[in-house]
Image: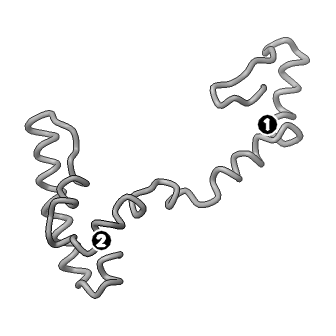
Amino acid sequence: MALVAKGVSRQEAHEQIRVLSHQASAVVKLEGKSNDLVERIKGDQFFASIHGELNSLLDAKTFIGRAPQQVEKYLRFDGEVEQVLKKYRSAGQITDKTSGAGLKI
């Protein structure tokens, strides 16, 4: 979409990505190597107009929206999860410990 915003045909951009992704897929499947699609895009002149933007375009934070805040709200100790945990703590089925996420449960 970044290419389209710069005036490149959506169909042409899609085709170029398709070709490179098939090449990268073959490297993974046939040679057992790591997926090098991003490196292929960075090295392809067709994508030159967005080379400087690729890292920010591929930043996972761009795609997760409000998920971190929603998880925090859900896991708040006065929330639903805590209410369920209280039930099991009182029955002795679980004890307090720190989870891998650093949350005290």
The crowd level at tag 2 (other Cα within 10 Å; few <14, some 14-19, many 20+) is: some
Check the image and tell me how it is coloured. one colour
Q: Earlier in the sequence, mark 2 or mark 1?
A: 2
Amino acid type, mark 2: Ile
Report the residue marked by disc 2.
Answer: 50
- At mark 1, the secondary structure is helix
Side of 71 relative to 76 (left or right): left
Query: Which sits in the foreground, 18 or 56?
Result: 56
Which quadrant does the C terminus fall into? top right
- Which residue extends farthest front? 52
Side of 33 relative to 59 (left or right): left
* Residue beneath the point at 55% across and 56% down: 64
Image position, residue 7 (x, y; %):
28, 88
Q: CA distance from mark 2 to mark 1?
A: 44 Å
* Residue beneath the point at 78% across and 15% down: 94
- At mark 2, the secondary structure is helix
